Image (cartoon, rainbow, N blue to C red):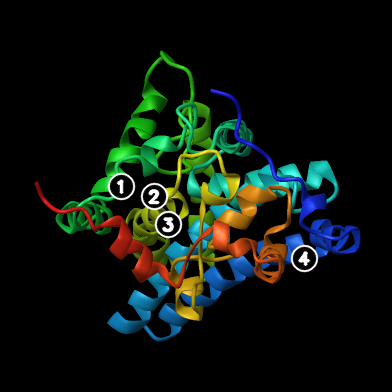
Amino acid sequence: MPVVARVDPRAVFTPERWSRLTSRSSLRGMWLVLHAWGTIVAAIALVTLWPNPLTWLVAVTVVGARQLGLAILMHEAAHGGLHSNKAINEWTGQWLCAVPVGADLASYRSYHLQHHKFTQQPEDPDLSLSAPFPITRESYTRKAIRDLTGQTFVKQRLPLFLSLFKRKIADEAVSHESFVSSGADKMARFLGLNALLFGLFWLAGAGIWFWGVWVFAMATWLPLVTRIRNIAEHACTSTGEDPFSHARTTRANPIERLLIAPYWVNYHAEHHLFMYLPCYRLPEAHRLLIEKGLIERMEVRPGYLDVMRLATSSQRA
């Protein structure tokens, strides 16, 4: 199968607008990483200072979403978008974004670029995530329950933990269901960095919340919002030749951006059309595509509830 068609930006944008869209700010990239960790710290501080069921629930959902945010910023680094200095981009994307949540920047980049090259085609490594949809509501409910009860987390992470005690017998890979990378060395880095995080939590007087919020969020809310993100990006989109129809943009409201779709990940159609745009330029690209009348060729939904209705519209046979 040939690679998917690419859109020539010169046919869509003026040179001045394209120059603005592609301009990258290393300062802004670093700010996004600081923002992700700052939000996590604020959520942990909230439940530490006022421990009750409501603040705990807020902390778990916010932290789980920012853990997804770290993976999204790793994705930004995979496209070279966090910092103009390659060494800083790679170090930040690896150690401050990828490793804390069990990912690996180099492995993810290799896997992810194949996804861009063959989007929604048989060679797309992510095709298995979108091909089964639409599914029934009952099927999705079962998946969501597995996510929120930690079953998905154990299924994904336990084999990786056990790999620490086994001789390497297979090539390392990136999970199609998540951004987590296999390999004993990657698992060792993940555990080592999280041990460091536990030490920092403990020194701050919040050791219990490392387990009660950071780990609990990673085991519950993170798998669910990762699943929702995967569904929203490509489920029930076209497998045809038009690159405008291979991915979906979802117009997320502020609550959805806080709890489900951080750092403009909802503008996924724009990202696939112009994959080297910094994530903070995607809303502007969306507005310009509306002005050009090209939005009609794209799959755009008004919110995540609407996407989930579409993705769970299959009727039981």
Dot 2 falls on a residue whose secondary structure is loop
Q: Which mark is residue 235?
A: 2
Dot placed on the residue nearer the N-terminal end, 4 or 1: 4
For the residue carrying disc 3, how many other residues have a C-alpha within 10 Å: few (<14), some (14-19), or many (20+)? many
**Alpha carbon distance from label 4 to label 3:** 26 Å
Mark 3 and mark 1 lie on one chain; the one further toward the N terminus is 1
What residue lies at 87% left-to-right and 58% top-to-bottom? 19
- Circles 2 and 3 in contact, beta carbons < 8 Å: yes
Q: Is residue 65 above or below residue 119?
A: below
User: Of circles 4 and 3, which is in front?
Assistant: 3
Please provide percent x and percent y for residue 54: 32, 83
Q: Residue at x 67, y 43 (%)?
A: 78
Whether residue 139 is visible to the viewer of this picture, yes or no, is: yes
List the residue tagged with mark 4. Answer: 28
Residue 9 appears at what percent x and percent y?
78, 51
Q: Work out whether mark 1 precedes mark 2 in sequence or the reverse, and give the earlier one.
A: 1
Point out residue 76 in the picture as x, y percentages from the top left corner. 66, 51
Q: Would you say 159 lies left or right of 178 here? A: left
User: Which comes sooner in the sequence, label 4 or label 2?
Assistant: 4
Task: Indicate the amino acid at tag 4.
Answer: Arg
Seen at 30% across and 47% down, the residue is 133
Q: In terms of secondary structure, where does tag 1 sit? A: loop
If you read the primary sequence from the N terminus, does the residue marked by circle 4 or circle 3 appear first? 4
| Residue placed most toward the observer, 44 or 169 | 169
Which residue: 45% across, 30% down? 182
Mark seen at residue 133: 1
Gap between marks 1 and 2 measured at Cα:
6 Å
Mark 4–mark 2 distance (CA, rounded to whole Å):
31 Å
Q: Which residue is mark 3?
A: 232
Instruction: State the mark number for residue 55.
Output: none
Q: Amino acid at mark 3?
A: Ala
